[in-house]
Image: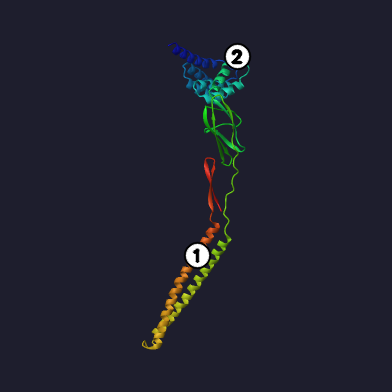
Amino acid sequence: MGAHLLFVYTARAATLSVVLAGAFPLAAAEPPPRSREVQELIDEAEKAAKRLELARARELWARVNAIDPSTMAVCQLGQYDLRLDRLEEAAAELEECVEKMPAPTDDVERRRYEVRHADLAAVRQRVAELHVSPPPGTARLLVDGREVSAGSPVFVAPGQHEVTAMGEQGQVVRALVKVEARQSRGVRLPLFEAPKAPATSARNPWIMGAGAAASVALLGAGVGLRVAGDFAERETAAKAARLSDGSMFPSSAQFREVYDEANAADTRARLFHGFGSAALVAGAALGAATVVYVVWPRKAEIRPRGAGAEVRLVW
């Protein structure tokens, strides 16, 4: 029973310290005038804190800091995030708060100064700190997918974390790091690889020459055979005309001789036309294949680029 009462008293005391910390200005000097919107948000945040609605009060102070950034707002965010167990955010905010707070000039300010230093020391006992050294040419730096600034300490929870650097040309390097609470660790990422020149395959001149020569030869042979077939067709027509002009008797040896010659000419015409057409088709196909070999892309290279990808055809 006594332990339970002690826990309740400690929780209420911690919450009360947040409320009281926001009730006084940071320095004895008169604070600059605030806009009506900002003052209304601060008043509402103080009411939410008195009702122990810490998440609501933190949300209102975040809006205040977005409208009118100030050390006071950052300090309030750090204290609320600590009480809400948002340790990584609290560590970064309290670090900035303590760094920018002016030296105290009276007992009230000294008390607040000591409380915020104590809060920072408390949260540092529960988080780790990374100091990331990104490679030259880094466009974005991420820790567990969260974008961070190079050169500033990054507070993380104990455990394993992924640090990623993205280059200006889409290169990516990563490192895994495991840390414990209260540990401060440097992380040096490796250099980006230089963009590789697309690999291209040299064309074999023998294949190109042989393909072109064979294509020309086949096309020439096809044309020649088609011409020869046309001559044979004309010869067949001439022989057939002699057989039908009545100058020879069908039973005569001359008629049979002319008939055989007409049949032979017709056979030659069909053969020449058939082989000529095949040669023309083969020559055209071989020529097209040679052209494709010369001009067709050897491969497609895909590179990541920002949120998308770049496809590059390589000849």
Q: Which residue is mark 1?
A: 284
Task: Locate residue 312, reporting x and y percent.
Answer: 54, 49
For this orientation, the residue located farthest to the top is 2
Query: In the image, what residue occupies the spot 46% across and 68% down?
Result: 278
| Relative image position of residue 307 (x, y in whole percent) | 52, 40
271 w.r.t. 243: above or below: above
Q: Residue at x 46, y 75 (%)?
A: 229
Q: Residue at x 51, y 63 (%)?
A: 286
Neighbour tally class for label 2: few under 14, some 14-19, many 20 plus, Cα within 10 Å = few
Between residues 128 and 49, which one lies in front from this camera angle?
128
Q: Which kind of residue does numbered mark 2 sit on?
A: Arg
Residue marked by disc 2: 110
Q: Amino acid at mark 1?
A: Ala
Can the viewer see residue 257 in this picture?
yes
> What crowding class fits label 1: few (fewer than 14 Cα within 10 Å), some (14-19), or many (20 or more)?
some
Q: Which quadrant of the view contains residue 72?
A: top right
Residue 41 percent coordinates (x, y):
51, 21
Display coloring: rainbow
| Residue 25 on image: x %, y % | 58, 16
Cα gap from disc 1 to disc 2, whole angstroms: 94 Å
Q: Secondary structure at mark 1?
A: helix
- Along the viewing direction, whichever of 61 and 171 lies nearer the viewer: 171
The N terminus sits in image quarter = top left
Secondary structure under tag 2 reads helix
Looking at the picture, tell me which residue is in the foreground, 36 or 198: 198
Residue 78 tag number: none
N-term-proximal mark, 1 vs 2: 2
